[in-house]
Image (cartoon, grey):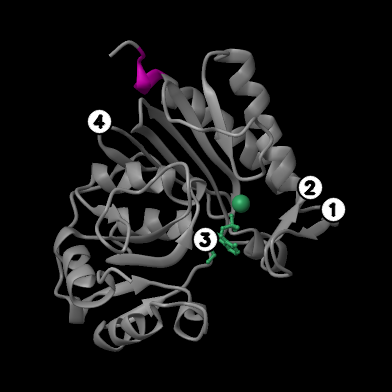
Amino acid sequence: MSMNFLELEQVARDWTYEAGEKVKQSLENPIHIESKSNPNDLVTEVDKAIEQFFYEKITQHYPDHLFLGEEGIAEELTSLEGTVWIIDPIDGTMNFVHQKYNFAISVAVYHEGVGMIGIVYDVMSDEMFRAVRDSGAYLNDVELLPVLERPLEESIVGINARWLVEGRNPYQNPLRALVRDLRGTRSYGSAAIELAYVAADRLDGYICVKLSPWDYAAGAVLLEEVGCKISTFQGKRLSMLTPNTVIAGKPQLHKEMISGYVGEEL
Ligand code: 2AM
Ligand code: CA
């Protein structure tokens, strides 16, 4: 391994805490909000400033590294060759705006397409979920244990209720059936936090019809480190360059949710 990813994670962690402080300070003043693809797809000047903060740090300290972020500050990325930082400056922007709670900074480092570092920082609860490939996953300074399986009917899965009513969503019926069969569902409004919760055994699974790479890049590293699975609804590897359906969970539950509910090729 040419690069020491444990050292790089220390640096990424420091920057993430620094970014978290900036986000917290920003909540003391009124925030300017804009819409993106639709009226409910929000972005604020804070999202942009935090992405800019990481972009400047990375280009300054690691000029040969590449950058992929939600707000599109860097040039568009067409391959995952080399070392790539995949960053969501604020995941859960709607929560950030409406609740001032339950949002995260998501930072991942991929090397030649392989997830090496994953950090999900829940800023307001000061919970940092972090992992370096093959070196364990942690919640702050406590190591996360390999997850224990539960049967599907005793499982709790993170899902946004919108996917059960959205007419344009082809997975509506399989998802309704799944929700009926599970013990319960939860919705936190931040994909990054929900994936981290699966890794930390607070949820057994998480499912979303459409997410972008910056929403799940860090979560995927955390999940793999504790023995969980994450894939498309068809069980395929997630692309880190295009949006995907996303299903994550403990291995047996992940398999059952795919084979019994959402796995059929549409
Ligand atoms: P975001 O806050 O960074 O946009 C909400 O259920 C979760 O879905 C959040 O993690 C949110 O990320 C993500 N998401 C991805 N694409 C979205 C979109 N087009 N509109 C709203 N939320 C989106
Ligand atoms: Ca975001």
Residue receiving disc 3: 190
* Disc 4 packing (10 Å; few <14; some 14–19; many ≥20): few
Q: Position of residue 9 (x, y in %)?
A: 42, 26
Residue 57 falls inside the magenta stretch: no
Q: Main secondary structure of the magenta part?
A: helix
Whole-percent x and y of residue 255? Answer: 17, 64
In terms of sequence position, does the residue under pointer 2 or pointer 1 come before the other? Answer: 1
Q: Residue at x 35, y 49 (%)?
A: 238
Question: x, y (%) of residue 165?
Answer: 50, 86
Q: Is the CB atom of the residue marked by disc 2 within 8 angstroms of ligand 2's nearest atom? A: no
Residue found at the very far top of the displayed protein: 2
Say whether marks 2 and 4 touch (CB < 8 Å).
no
The residue labelled by disc 2 is 45
Q: Which residues are magenta?
A: 3-7
Label 3 vs 1, first from the N-terminus: 1
Q: Residue at x 19, y 55 (%)?
A: 147
Calculate the distance from the C-alpha at mark 1 to the C-alpha at mark 4. Answer: 40 Å
Distance of mark 2 from mark 1, alpha carbons? 12 Å
Label 3, label 1: how far apart the Cα atoms are: 23 Å
Secondary element under disc 1, as helix, strand or loop, is: loop
Label 1 crowding class (10 Å Cα cut-off): few <14, some 14-19, many 20+? few
Residue position for label 1: 29
